Image (cartoon, rainbow, N blue to C red):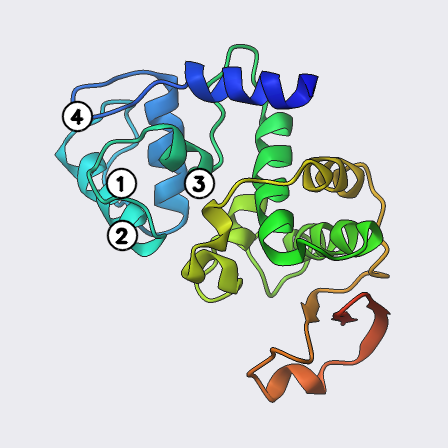
């Protein structure tokens, strides 16, 4: 309950950044959108027309209202926590928890941690982006970003699972892929060597 209240306060405190805004958060927005290919102008901490356009592009691609304003939902999707004292660690927990909740809601707790571990394993693998946000927002990597599940309320267990995964627990055995056999549409995924089955997910190398 306390955690939920804190999260609500953090969301309430989140400011909206728009054209004319300046500062370190604007720099973070520009840097992340640049890393993902949405923004190609200079990273100067000034929310100008190019930044606004990049935010609109990101919003339109990720199921958000494309108004060019980086409010709490957009900031959360980008992985930026604007509450006082926020650290990159807490940003990572929030972003990973959102992915775990969307991809593994209803799965056993171990399976939720395993999904988080797969994301982290990808950051260390040469075939994937080397940042948590880069892996999560890699085009086509996770269906929850295209079907809107990524932006639904995050379950409490997902926050704990994200923290456990970030602390080094890897029930997946080093997997870099997972899928649900009953919903998978890719024949290729079945070619990946199986490591372990947890709940409805098969975790593969």
Q: CA distance from mark 4 to mark 2?
A: 18 Å
Specify whether 20 is left or right of 87: left
Q: Nearer the viewer, mark 1 or mark 2?
A: 2
Q: Which residue is mark 4?
A: 19
Asked whether residue 35 is in view, the answer is yes
Q: Residue at x 55, y 83 (%)?
A: 185
Q: In terms of image quadrants, where is residue 5?
A: top right
Residue 55, labelled with which disc? 1
Image position of 202 with respect to 74: above or below: below
Q: Nearer the viewer, mark 4 or mark 2?
A: 2
Q: CA distance from mark 4 to mark 3?
A: 19 Å
Could you tell me residue 141's position as x and y percent?
Answer: 52, 64
In the depicted view, which residue is nearer to us: 205 or 203?
203
Mark before the other along the chain sequence, 3 or 1 = 1
In the depicted view, which residue is nearer to us: 155 or 150?
155
Q: Which residue is mark 2?
A: 60
Q: Residue at x 46, y 56 (%)?
A: 145
| Discs 3, 1 touching: Cβ within 8 Å | no
Specify whether 142 is left or right of 35: right
Give the structural element (helix, strand or loop) at label 1: helix
* Pointer 4 local density, CA inside 10 Å: few below 14, some 14–19, many at least 20: some
| Discs 4, 1 touching: Cβ within 8 Å | no
Q: Which residue is mark 3?
A: 77
Could you tell me residue 143's position as x and y percent?
Answer: 50, 64
Give the structural element (helix, strand or loop) at label 4: loop
Could you tell me residue 90's position as x and y percent?
Answer: 62, 26
């Amino acid at each position: 309950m306390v955690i939920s209240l804190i999260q609500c306060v953090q969301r309430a405190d989140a400011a909206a950044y728009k054209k004319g805004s300046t500062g370190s958060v604007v720099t973070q927005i520009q840097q992340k959108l640049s890393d993902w290919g949405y923004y190609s102008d200079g990273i100067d901490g000034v929310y100008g027309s190019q930044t606004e356009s990049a935010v609109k592009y990101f919003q339109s691609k990720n199921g958000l209202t494309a108004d060019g304003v980086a409010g709490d939902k957009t900031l959360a999707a980008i992985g930026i926590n604007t509450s006082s004292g926020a650290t990159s660690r807490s940003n990572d927990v929030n972003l990973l928890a959102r992915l775990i909740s969307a991809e593994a809601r209803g799965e056993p707790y171990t399976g939720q941690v395993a999904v988080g571990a797969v994301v982290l394993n990808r950051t260390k693998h040469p075939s994937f982006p080397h940042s948590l946000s880069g892996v999560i927002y890699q085009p086509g990597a996770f269906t929850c970003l295209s079907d809107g599940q990524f932006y639904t309320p995050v379950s409490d267990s997902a926050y704990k699972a994200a923290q456990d995964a970030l602390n080094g627990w890897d029930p997946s055995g080093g997997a870099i892929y997972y899928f649900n056999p009953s919903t998978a549409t890719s024949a290729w995924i079945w070619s990946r060597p199986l490591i372990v089955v947890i709940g409805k997910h098969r975790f593969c190398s």
